Image (cartoon, helix red, strand yellow):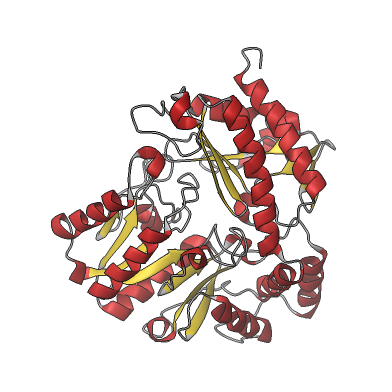
């Protein structure tokens, strides 16, 4: 069966809204390499959107899953619990940032984790409001769409959304939004939309994912922590895309040495098996009554076994250190490319192995070549066309590559943390050729 034949079958059977970036159908994958049904090989720089941090089909994860499936595959953790779930909760509560005693709960998806954070925050504080940030992404369910700070494609056609959800500016130096600007924007929300005494929680991604891989400055996270403490607001860290060694720390909030009250975890938690978690301060987590939290498949024994193996691999293979090494290799090569194409590449951003290339139509070389961006007047317009051209050309160059960004003009790189130096070099060589082809009139 060819890729084209399978794509035609998919279009006939799948709802249009659940599209796919590439008409490339996978037959097998190993570590950072993927092969399609026609035998074509690709280097995966998306890892299922930061899910396979330990690479595709890591032997330790495969073996853990095999053993668990042979024992049993499901009983529902809320009916007959099992040791793998208890052990995983113990480990996650120990790994979460900060010295406070913590507890955990399990669900299946990142969006569920966000929704449960909101439920827990409201139960704990008795308050109604939740503040998120422009450009943030928190999921596709009704509540999480309301929190997501971008309309198309996530919110268009799907309203109305729940009340008492508000947005403040996210600080992005390259787009002339400073930390002070963002903090003033938050104070404006307090003055114009909801009093801080009515706010249950503020939720933030320490590095925006779908929004464009913009890191929240440590200064900003520290200021949010102080504001939350001042007003009795809970601080929620959405670590769904940043967690599990992706940024060079187990969780990205550790870069700022900030302890959140609640955290969401998903994606890289279980090596590709559906699992998500909420971990938070024990007294806050215990606010909902028994039966108020949970789900039929939440804390699947198979996924929990996979997650325990993932944590073991992260430790044994030193993947936090490896994330920093891989990220540095990518950033070095991409900044070299930026120097050559300074009018097209506004900024290279890198936190661990979360790397982004922001593309514009033609910025002033003096502002863009330094790597820090310029003012809004000289950075050029978002180059969505070039971004999409790179995505379209990726398969023919043997790469799987993803886009993101508030304006859709950012290429993001999420390589497996188990990727070899040789594959890193090969991937970067392929990307450089791809980029030059994308900007060439001949293509």
Q: Would you say residue 93 is visible in this rendering?
A: yes
State which quadrant residue 286 falls in: bottom left
Query: As rendered, which of 173 and 204 lies closer to the eye?
Result: 173
Query: As rendered, which of 132 and 326 lies closer to the eye?
Result: 326
Residue 342: percent from the left, percent from the top? 53, 27
Residue 40: percent from the left, percent from the top? 82, 36
> Residue most toward the top?
442
Residue 172: percent from the left, percent from the top? 39, 45
Determine the residue positioned at 76% across, 76% down: 68
Position of 208 with respect to 61 (left or right) is left
Tell me the quadrant of the picture where the C terminus can be found: top right
Position of 407 with respect to 51 (left or right) is left
Q: Would you say residue 168 is visible in this rendering?
A: no
Residue 343: percent from the left, percent from the top? 50, 24
Please determine whether, in this image, residue 232 is positioned above or below residue 174. Answer: below
> Residue most toward the right?
39
């Amino acid at each position: 069966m060819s890729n084209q034949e399978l794509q035609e079958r998919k279009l006939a059977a799948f709802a249009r809204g659940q599209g796919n970036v590439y008409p490339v159908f996978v037959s097998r994958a190993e570590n950072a390499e993927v092969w399609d049904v026609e035998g074509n090989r690709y280097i995966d720089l998306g890892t299922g959107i930061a899910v396979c941090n330990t690479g595709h089909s890591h032997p330790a994860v495969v073996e853990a899953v095999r053993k668990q499936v042979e024992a049993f595959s499901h009983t529902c953790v809320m009916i007959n619990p099992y040791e793998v779930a208890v052990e995983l909760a113990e480990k996650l509560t120990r790994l979460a940032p900060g010295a406070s005693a913590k507890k955990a709960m399990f669900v299946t998806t990142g969006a569920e984790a966000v929704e449960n954070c909101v439920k827990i925050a409201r139960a704990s504080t008795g308050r109604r409001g939740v503040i998120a940030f422009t450009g943030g992404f928190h999921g596709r369910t009704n509540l999480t769409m309301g929190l997501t700070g971008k309309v198309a494609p996530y919110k268009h056609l799907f309203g109305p959304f729940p009340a008492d959800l508000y947005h403040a500016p996210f600080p992005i130096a390259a787009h002339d939004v400073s930390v002070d600007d963002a903090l003033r924007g938050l104070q404006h929300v307090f003055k114009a939309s909801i009093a801080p005494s009515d706010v249950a929680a503020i939720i933030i991604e320490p590095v925006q994912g779908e929004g464009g891989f913009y890191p929240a400055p440590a200064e900003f996270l520290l200021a949010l922590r102080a504001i939350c403490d001042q007003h009795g607001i809970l601080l929620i860290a959405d670590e769904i895309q940043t967690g599990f060694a992706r940024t060079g720390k187990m969780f990205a909030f550790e870069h700022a040495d900030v302890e959140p009250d609640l955290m969401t975890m998903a994606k890289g938690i279980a090596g590709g098996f559906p699992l998500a978690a909420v971990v938070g301060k024990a007294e806050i987590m215990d606010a909902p009554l028994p039966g108020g939290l949970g789900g039929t498949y939440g804390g699947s024994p198979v996924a929990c076994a996979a997650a325990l193996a993932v944590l073991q691999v992260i430790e044994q293979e030193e993947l936090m250190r490896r994330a920093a090494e891989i990220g540095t290799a990518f950033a070095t090569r991409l900044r070299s490319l930026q120097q050559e194409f300074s009018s097209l590449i506004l900024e290279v951003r890198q936190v661990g192995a979360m790397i982004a290339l922001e593309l514009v139509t033609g910025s002033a070389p003096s502002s863009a070549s330094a790597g820090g961006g310029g003012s809004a007047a000289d950075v050029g317009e978002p180059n969505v066309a070039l971004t999409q051209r790179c995505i379209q050309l990726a398969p023919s160059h043997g790469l799987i590559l993803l886009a993101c960004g508030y304006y859709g003009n950012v290429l993001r790189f999420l390589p497996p943390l188990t990727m070899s130096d040789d594959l890193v070099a090969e991937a970067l060589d392929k990307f450089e050729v791809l980029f030059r082809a994308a900007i060439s009139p001949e293509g």
